Amino acid sequence: MLKHLRAILSYYAPIHGQWAGPYDLVEITNEHRSVPLSEITHAVVLPDPEGAVLMWCHVYPANFDPNAHGGQPGPTHTFLWKPGDPQRVTKFDVPNNVNGSEDLFCGGHQFLPDGDVLSFGGTDMTSTSHIFGHAAAFRFDLATQSWSSAGTMHRERWYPNGFLTPSGVVVTIGHTENPVYALPELTTQRMQDRFSATTGAWASSATVSEPSLRNARLSSTAGIPCGVPDNVVEIHDYPRRHLLARARQLRYMDLETSQQDWHLSFTTSCTTLPADRWILQAGGLNIQHAEGSTGHVVVLGPSTDLTFPRDYGFVAAGQERTTTYAAQTDVDMWSDVGTAAVWDPTFPDLIQGRINQNLVILADGSLLVVGGSDVDPMSGVEGVARLNPERFVSSNFPLPGTGDAWLAMAPQTHERRYHSVAGLLPDGRVFSAGGANGDLQPPAPEPWHHSIEIYSPPYLFNGPRPVISGLTATTWPISQVPLPPNPSFSVQLRPGSTLDRVALVRTGSITHAFDSSQRYVVLNTAVFPDPATPDKYTVIVTLPPTLFATPAGDYMLFALSSLGVPSVASMIRIN
């Protein structure tokens, strides 16, 4: 019977992939009780060859001993998980600034150029309703694996987002200090804060005033003529924004109310208004989403050509809060290929409508949608969990080809709904964890809230993997003049296959089913056979042209064979 089952799985895996687990997590320091994790809500894939993931979660009374912290819930517990030992985690406490009142839950987080993690905002536990944000920030030191204070922002933030700009500054935007949707949105969510990775400090209030996020109504990105400030830019839950290479700008898409598309230009020459004002894109979004906290945006750049970098953005489905609360199947593609930036609503749609799903870029550039459910829990209806992931593989990478469609993958065991996380590991697998029912959640954690499953995509069952060796450099400096020598390495391929591409994938920073920095960047290469070793090649890589194409930080370097099989990633740091 067991032999028969293995034969079935062996046939099934090359088409639909395969899950391992679920693993119920326990602390390394106390292996005989469950870790007090509930809804693994935040996850950061550290620049670690083992694929270590830093996680933290929702606040439940079971997590803390209030009497030990002066009546407050105590410090946020974060956990380090390694896929090589998937059932055990190591705990790190975050030192709160004010008697344990600042919880990292529902905050934002981004990588700094040195691999450290900046966490900002979250939940203020002194509030009687536990829904107000706080202004504290914390830094996880990668070298010492410990947390420390990173100062305070100028305003409280709850459901904020941020992005590391090419100048080494994390720009944070959103959200209001009162997230009750029925109330008018406050001015706090329109204001930005800026954290310098160089100085380790937040900018003074004089440089982050609210007007810098107003609509400039520029009629020309060249800056002439320049209009006067008009209406403010509405910025919502975990703003969907990404940095574009060709356009050299930060893009923000309002997927919730106005369905408008804005960009924050770093290169505008407008002489009468500040350069960091938001500019409305012409043409709108042409998408059907109406919920800012469930739509996804990822960047698939097919090339880092020095003269012609290209940008492709994908937005995956979310629910329609304003009507039926039902999840959507809609997927759209935005492209900027040097002529015009346009939305394509004809991109293949998902098989199943999903809300609170995760969208993960895989090692081969394909897209994987994991988890979610068919209805928003705010509707008061539990709905049906989506256990089957869906994968999109382009026949004309990265653009879709004729007949391309999303395909159902192997089902996972545990439900991964609201507050779930999923991300790519350096070995090409995907972790999936957490997940609750949102407003329907019980007062105590469900079993799946503190478990992890690991997915092996179909490409891991297509034969031997390419092997990267002999990297001449693992730190790549960008935008230096003259450029340093281009890095090189060796790739050993399976006999009969060739090198299809070499790509960088940004290490993941995931919360509330969204990774705001996710991108896939194909590198230009020169390939030379090794005369001494069959099927071995020397690969010379052209460095990315600017930090707009590859923002500073850590990446997974994959070599992909013509059989569609990726190598295990080597970790690369761009600075």
Image (spheres, rainbow, N blue to C red):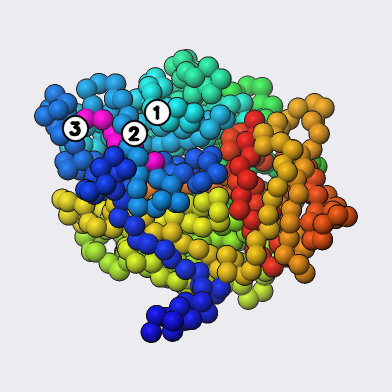
The residue that label 2 is drawn on is 92
Identify which residue is drawn at 58% across, 38% down: 554
Q: Earlier in the sequence, mark 1 or mark 2?
A: 2
> The magenta stretch spans which residues?
74-80
The reply to whether callout 1 and callout 2 are in contact (CB within 8 Å) is yes
**Residue 255 at x, y percent in the picture:** 45, 50
Task: Tell me the quarter of the picture where residue 99 sits.
Answer: top left
Q: Residue at x 16, y 41 (%)?
A: 61
Which disc, if any, is residue 146? 1
Q: Indicate the position of residue 228 as horizontal and vertical percent values.
A: 56, 28
- Mark 2 vs mark 3, foreground winner is 2
Decide if residue 322 is in sight here.
no
Secondary structure of residue under mark 3 = loop
Q: Quadrant of the C terminus?
A: top right
Determine whether 270 is above or below 352 in the image. Answer: above
Given residues 229 and 324, the one toward you in this image is: 324
* Circle 3 crowding by C-alpha within 10 Å: few under 14, some 14–19, many from 20: many
Identified by mark 1, the residue type is Ser
Residue density around tag 1, few if under 14, some if 14–19, many if 20 or more, within 10 Å:
few
Whether residue 463 is visible, yes or no, is yes
Cα–Cα gap, marks 1 and 2:
7 Å
Q: Nearer the viewer, mark 1 or mark 3?
A: 1
Q: Is residue 237 magenta?
A: no
Residue 73: give its label. 3
